[in-house]
Amino acid sequence: MKKLLFTSALVCTLLLCAGALADAADITASVRLEATGNTRLLKRLTDRRFDRAWQGGRGHGALTVRSDIPMYGLYVIWEESPRAFTLAGGSGSATEYGDSAFLHQYYPLNGEKEIRLIPENDNGKHFGIKEIYVLGEGEVPSWVQRWEPTWEDADLMLLFAHPDDEVLFFGGLLPYYGTERGLRVVPVVLTDAGSQRSTELLNCLWSLGQRHYPVFGPFRDVYAWSLKDAYAKFGKNKTTRFLVEQLRRFKPEVLVTHDVGGEYGHGAHRLCADLAIRSLNLSSDASFDGESYALYGGHALQKLYLHLYRENSLVMDWDQPLLSFGGRTGFELAEDAYGSFHLSQHRYEQYRVEPRDSKYSSYRFGLYFSSVGPDVQKNDLMENTEIVVGGQGL
């Protein structure tokens, strides 16, 4: 009898532990949304579309969420970097959140059945929300994005022109180096391609294992027909100062970016490559952009790789199985990420994650510059660097 009681108690304990570790349910479908204004567009908050938003602020006051099921988490996809607001519970609790740079944010709750999002100082600014997800009790699901700040000291920086280029032309780079190898990778997207594409980029990066927030450039996304056209539209000095500041701030050992020919000729792609080349000496030059030099000091890259560069070329193996992703390959992950998240670009049938043997292969790179010697193995962007991960040299 004692053995039976012990076994029963053990089973109960295991079940309780399993229950405690279960993912919280998405209870959004059961909540009720209210606002003091702009009620007609409240349905946008739960339509699971990222191309439109509900607009609070501008006299519309608070957004109220009510639920018969206790709420333990709120995941918000903001239209733009949110300004300060108060998250108030029906029981009188209130948490103040300041301005933030993160477009996707998770806010823990304590089992409230009513919460209000009250924008600070309704001064006519937007309080735009694209989507909300309300969670019940349990562990926060892995699909909920809880971003960490951008790495302060990077190992590798990936500079790309637009959201989706990070997978179309660089294939398995992010899941391999950022997750499988555990390097501090900073993705930098040059253009501000709009709220929808920024959300698509964050969703893509999260699926590839990125947990530290990327850098979004300030340049409006316009098509450029040539490098000259790109500099005319974006500003040569302004774009150069931007990249030099990123290099000084995050201090990567290796920089990877686009083809000098812009892959299929896009001027913004060409601009990224030209900026990288121009910045090799400027990033350590105290006479250039004294403001960022005073903030971060100078920085000298160890290596610069350009996509498709024919000299000192190497072919990356994005087809090797990655343990961090259950044996899936970096190329497979990139294909799935583009197909699942960069939905706004699917109307362009010519875009795809470039396979190994294609004209714009996402596997092929060339070493444009190295201060640590030539590549010998020619299969690793970090060859000859002294990057340490988990206490072990790579």
Image: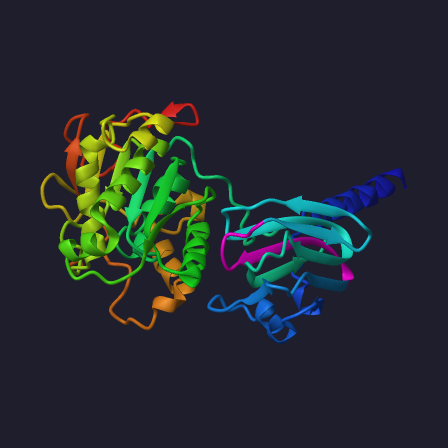
Q: Is residue 172 left or right of residue 117?
A: left
Residue 225: x %, y % from top left: 16, 62
Residue 356 in view: no
- What residue occupies the far front of the structure in this picture? 123
Q: Residue at x 19, y 59 (%)?
A: 266
Kindly report the secondary structure that dominates the magenta region of the rendered protein. Answer: strand
Asked which colour scheme the image uses, the reply is: rainbow
Q: Kindly indicate the quadrant of the structure image that contains residue 380.
A: top left
- What residue occupies the far right of the structure in this picture? 1
Magenta stretch? 68-83
Between 61 and 178, the residue placed more toward the observer is 61
Q: Is residue 73 highlighted in magenta?
A: yes
- Compared with 317, 225 (above or below) is below
- Compared with 163, 139 (above or below) is above
Q: Is residue 389 left or right of residue 227?
A: right
Residue 377: x %, y % from top left: 18, 34
Residue 288: x %, y % from top left: 23, 31
Q: Residue at x 53, y 57 (%)?
A: 78
Residue 53 in view: yes
Q: Is residue 325 left or right of residue 76?
A: left
User: Quadrant of the image for the C terminus?
Assistant: top left
- Compared with 184, 211 (above or below) is below
Q: Kindly indicate the quadrant of the structure image that contains residue 347.
A: bottom left
Q: Residue at x 24, y 45 (%)?
A: 257
Q: Is residue 145 left or right of residue 341?
A: right
Between 17 and 147, the residue placed more toward the observer is 147
User: Quadrant of the image for the N terminus?
Assistant: top right
Q: Is residue 334 highlighted in magenta?
A: no
